[in-house]
């Protein structure tokens, strides 16, 4: 197990995006029951997703998961104590996919 980062890997993911009066969200779900933990990073590949008002979309993309190592995971938990703060990072990028 690495101290700062574990080896990155690619996986498919589902992205649900909705923009309406009742909801405005984007949810990413990784295929294969991959558990995301504090300090992990997920980068979703592909063009920007544009959804008009009153619409929703569900699409499939590739994602790169960069798991945190033991030290990075502990640091993330320690620095987030007592705060309402996300413990993981998800980013979208245009890429080779």
Image: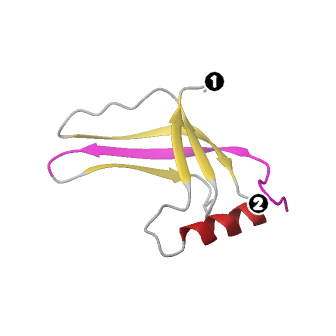
Magenta region: 1-21
Q: Is residue 53 left or right of residue 83?
A: left
Task: Depth check: give the residue in front, 72 or 96.
Answer: 72
Q: Secondary structure at mark 2?
A: loop
**Residue at 23% of width from left, 52% of height from top?**
23
Where residue 37 appears, as percent x and y from the top left, is 62, 64
Magenta stretch contains residue 4: yes
Q: Label 2: which residue?
A: 69
Tell me if mark 2 has few (under 14), some (14-19) or many (20+) residues whose alpha carbon lies within 10 angstroms of its own: some
**Residue at 70% of width from left, 55% of height from top?**
67
- Above-or-below relation of 35 to 95: below
Between marks 2 and 1 in the image, the one whose residue lies nearer the viewer: 2
Task: Depth check: give the residue in front, 38 or 78.
Answer: 78
Q: How is the image coloured?
A: secondary structure
- Above-or-below relation of 56 to 2: above
Task: Depth check: give the residue in front, 42 or 78.
Answer: 78
Specify the farthest residue to the bottom.
82
Between disc 2 and disc 1, whose residue precedes? 2
- Above-or-below relation of 48 to 19: above
Q: Label 1: which residue?
A: 96
Q: Is residue 29 left or right of residue 68?
A: left
Residue 68, located in which quarter of the rendered image? bottom right
User: How far apart, in angstroms, are the residues tagged by discs 2 and 1?
Assistant: 26 Å
Where residue 25 appears, as percent x and y from the top left, is 32, 49
């Amino acid at each position: 197990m690495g101290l700062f980062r574990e080896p990155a890997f690619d996986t498919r993911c589902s992205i649900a995006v909705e923009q309406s009066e009742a909801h405005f969200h984007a949810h990413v779900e990784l295929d294969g029951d991959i558990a995301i933990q504090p300090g992990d990073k997920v980068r979703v590949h592909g063009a920007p997703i544009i959804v008009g008002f009153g619409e929703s979309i569900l699409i499939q993309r590739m994602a790169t998961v960069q798991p945190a190592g033991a030290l990075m995971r502990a640091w993330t938990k320690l620095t987030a104590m007592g705060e309402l703060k996300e413990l993981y990072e998800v980013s979208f990028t245009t890429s080779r996919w």
